Amino acid sequence: MRIILINPPISLDDVYGRFKKLASFQPPVGLASLAGYLLKYKHDVSIVDCNAIGFSVSDTVKYVQSESPDMVGLYTLSYNYPVIEILTRAIRQSSPKIKIVAGGPHATFLPHQTLQETPIDFCVMGEGEETLLLLIQHLEDGAKEFSEIEGLAYKSLDGEIIINSERVRVKDLDEMPFPAIHLLPPLETYKLYLLHHKRSPYMTVASSRGCPYKCVFCETPSGKIVRAHSPEYMVDYQMFLSKKFGVKEVMFLDDTFTINEKRVFKFCDLMIKNNIDMTWYSNAHANVRDLDLFKSMKAAGCWIVAVGIESGNQEVIDLLDKGTTKEQMRLTCKGVRDAGIKLKTFFVLGNPGDTPSRIDETIQFAKDLKPHFPVFSLMTPYPGAPLFETAEKYGTFDRAAGFHKQILATNDPVFVPFGVTKKILLQKQKEAFRKSYFSLGMIIRHLSGIESFKDIKVLIKAFFAFFEVQFTHINVQESLTDEKELNVCSKGESSEISVDNNLKKSKKNKLNKEKNVEICFTLNQRPNEHEERRIMAKE
């Protein structure tokens, strides 16, 4: 079967807002993993990463028309739902016979709504390799009945939405083939984080799946049971990336990279033993037991570790169900710094239970931990996260605002805890960045870490980017939906979502002048999302 996996257009403007200069579009390893699995079974697969190659909705639809696949698979995220709606309706109108499959977090946690509101035929829930392969085999056999395929949601012939039972997830990840990196655009085309990479080519890697923790703000499409590649598999893959694609740095995307400390120690030993010249980035749980782990990671090439802190108030930490204490967080962060690794910390403002004074505690705690890269986000409940169901218990949650408002760096928070206002949240966020980055301690940490002239240039760029963020006017009343328009209609009609500028095509895009699509749709026609981390590209 001919299959195109698509990573739909996302706007740095909309997703990261005023932080866009510091943001990135990274290689979608999930799509590459899915493609690698399908290639193993001799299917004709390609990946299209719209963000890397600069495809707009129009370009994507035209490409699908020109390739005439049997199936398209879409990776979807909740905050990109409006784009998915438009894209799927356009594909359906232009290519009525193509089967449209959606995967990823949104389709996993809201399959009924996704199928009901869009022309999507199937939703793959959770990890998609086995489910999608069985679906393809059924379609090739001419099947009309799919009730036996675990992990699948679909529309029956009479229009009824059927949600099958959950699939048992892959137990032995070492049995999975390497991701099909060769189907992605050249790795050099990806926009990387300004401050969070040292070398390129750069690739994202998932060495495990699942997360056992119960944080109320987090959704886990891969489930609560952690399964991990062996250290031997990990090192083999690192060597493959280095030799085949010249990769010099990787970012481990694991939710819980350090949960099995013995595995990480063994991986580091093998990296050193095999003399693999590769720098890397990972996260760490806020309660690492053996702090010597970070020294081993440093020796094996790790230069930056991210730790999820979330809050500086213990009562709020407990409400978030983090399962850690501030003292454990202090020790873990100190262990990172003492090993000579740069420390990135994640904080969330506007948590359940937050008050202005508790947010002040968080800002002070962020300074006390002495990170190199503190990040302050605003709480946004996503489908699949426990807080998405209980948000009104802790504050106001504007569910009617639409998924396009649930973005990573919003200027208009959709969740506001009781006793706080939107204005206060935005003011505190700017205050947090200002106090953390424009401080003597932060300046000394970064100046003492300079290793090359390139580091100096990056720091100067980052300084001006942060300066611009601090003095960017924020109008809480403005809606992204009202600020911009997306025009994907040949007749001059436009859809009222903030995507046109978001889907700007790169200068290298040969389709730059071909903006008109023979299809017209508006936001009233609600499209759907696919979430298995998949993209398009030819083998």
Image (cartoon, rainbow, N blue to C red):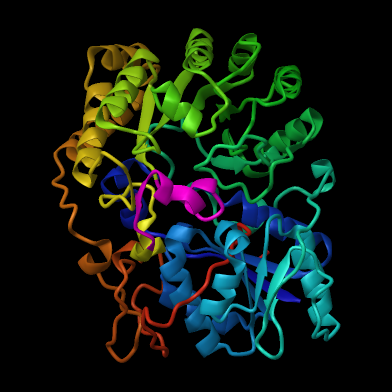
For residue 381: magenta?
yes
Residue 241 x, y percent position in the rendering:
67, 40
* 131 over 191 or under it: above or below: below
Quadrant location of the C terminus in the rendered image: bottom right
Judge whether 445 appears above or below 221 on screen: above
Quarter of the N terminus within the rendering? bottom right
Viewer-closest of 309 and 514: 309
In the rendered structure, the answer to whether residue 323 lies left or right of residue 442 reads right
Residue 162 in sight from this viewpoint: yes
- Segment tinted magenta in the rendering: 380-399
Task: Give left or right: position of 28 versus 311.
Answer: right
Residue 163, percent across and down?
70, 70
Q: Is residue 190 visible?
A: no
User: x, y percentage for residue 25?
Assistant: 45, 49
For this rendering, which residue is in front, 525 or 116?
116
Tell me the residue at 59%/77% (across/down).
120
Q: Residue at x 63, y 25 (%)?
A: 277
Residue 10 appears left or right of 207: left
Whether residue 412 is in magenta: the answer is no
